[in-house]
Image (cartoon, rainbow, N blue to C red):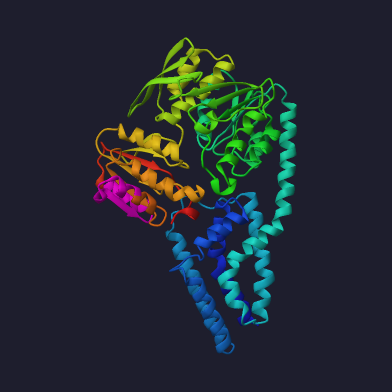
Amino acid sequence: MIYRILLFICMSWAVLIPAKRALHMFQQNRYENGRFIKWMKGNLTGPPISGYTVLVLFVLTTAIALLLKEPVSVIVLCVLFVIYGILNFLDEKKKNYIKPLVYTGRVKRQIAVMAVLWLLTALPAALMYSKWAFGILAAFCPWLFIFLMAWITSPIEAAVRQRYLNEAKAILRDHKDLIRIGITGSYGKTSTKNIMQAMLSEHFNSLMTPASYNTPMGITRTIREMLKPIHKIFVCEMGADHVGDITELMEFVHPQIGVVTSVGPQHLNTFGSQENITKEKMQMIELLPKDGFGILNYDNEFIRGYTVKNPVETVTYGIRSEDADYRAEDITYTPAGSVFTLVHGDEREQIETKLLGELNILNILSAIACARHLGVNWRTIKRASKTMKQVEHRLELKIINGYRFIDDAFNANPVGSAMALDVLSMMPNRRFIVTPGMIDLGPKQAEINEHFGSLMKDKADVVILVGRTQTKPIWDGLEKSGFNMDNVLVTDTVKEAFAYIYQAASREDTILLENDLPDAFSH
């Protein structure tokens, strides 16, 4: 009996790191079974060594259990599981995750359920010495238990979610004078939110949803933990990757002011079509109250071509659209930031900002349109534009180890990445770009990434691609454009890319970091 208990302990050690990694990848796939299944198709096994590890482990453990007698088989299995666990542990220690596992309350509940499932299956298998079970449990259960765990915890999470949601709704109902601003778009949401907050907080006591808290639970947490009676404005980012997401959030928050920053092929896999994306994002305007106020990016072809059915008042903004209500002209970029002339009717105001890129200027225009609607004067707007901090990881100019970087690492998109290249092209000396490309673009992903590669010619001098498989279309685009392929390097990790940068670049050069994929999607 003592041998079999020892076997259970060794099996538990062997699956510890694979189970952690399975939970980690499940979290990065937003706790969605469908996304997790898609991820598993391209990443069938966990560490260490190779893609055949799980199959080899299954065959070895089953063969040992069947061919050797107790207690020899138990001892050999224990040694095998201990070695496998050590290899996993050493492999995990070497990893430098871009986004580590976050031990939220939800993850802790998932860990508890996974532990119970393991006890209920592995302990009886070890005590009864079920020879066929060892290989299955050790090789496959850390991954397959995810689905059973998700099914078990689903009603618990739904109940927790609904209770918190009801509390947040009650808080909003009690805050009758609160001006609520909703912001959505395929890209530019977080930047616009930060810029809007920086500008409006110069005049009002304003709260915004932090980081990328743009889901029902993220917004709920913001309201429950941060919204106070002294706040006059609530700037709320609203994300969507399925049909109905914006509708749900609008019915939850009920904003009086709505901003649509962009519409594009982000999350095409889950939306199904560009038409669905456009219709869903524009629910931000369609569901505003009749006395509300809508703010629209007229440079975006999908927004411009959409006919709003809600009679709510709207204004437009743009750089390339001469008929937009708020426009930016005479834009110049320097390593210190941007300067442009804002045109609104007969008004012309020079705006200075530390922010770079057309997207950030568009975001400033939307914030100005909102501020003017709320009665903020030009002096306050100019001061806010000049002093506002750069938005983290969104064309953020920074010095790292003495080198000049443009950090555009957050969730690259086709329009934003093209504009980031335009900013890079205006920088002095040699220009580097480090990128893993773009994802979540459905069947057009390869085409969009190839086009991205073709745009780099004459705008970047050295290209470093991270991930050999996913960046192949970018390589093809570079090659077809006539880019000097001697100046293109492909690495497996961001760490390798940085090591090359620090060897090859000088302190006068500029390095653009374009996108930063979660570990689940980097290959």
Can residue 72 be seen in the rendering of this structure? yes
Was residue 485 drawn as part of the magenta stretch in this picture?
Answer: yes
Q: Nearer the viewer, residue 211 or 442?
A: 442
Measured as percent of width and height from the top left, residue 420 is found at 38, 36
Find the magenta span and give its range.
477-503
Measured as percent of width and height from the top left, residue 510 is found at 30, 38
Identify the image quadrant of the N terminus: bottom right
Q: Please tell me whether residue 117 is drawn above or below residue 158 in the rendered image.
A: below
Q: Hey, which quadrant is residue 509 in on the image?
A: top left
Q: Point out the residue furthest to the top here.
A: 346
Residue 401 horizontal side relative to residue 85, left or right: left
Measured as percent of width and height from the top left, residue 507 is found at 26, 38
Identify the image quadrant of the C terminus: bottom left
Q: Hey, which quadrant is residue 119 in on the image?
A: bottom right
Residue 334 horizontal side relative to residue 126, left or right: left
Residue 59 horizontal side relative to residue 293, left or right: left
Can residue 99 be seen in the rendering of this structure? no
Q: Residue at x 48, y 66 (%)?
A: 88
Residue 146 horizontal side relative to residue 165, left or right: left
- Count of numbered circles on the image: 0
Measured as percent of width and height from the top left, residue 74 is found at 57, 83
Q: Please tell me whether residue 474 is drawn above or below residue 114 in the rendered image.
A: above
Most common SS among magenta residues: helix
Was residue 99 drawn as part of the magenta stretch in this picture?
Answer: no
Q: Nearer the viewer, residue 181 or 118?
A: 181
Q: Please tell me whether residue 235 is drawn above or below residue 404 in the rendered image.
A: above
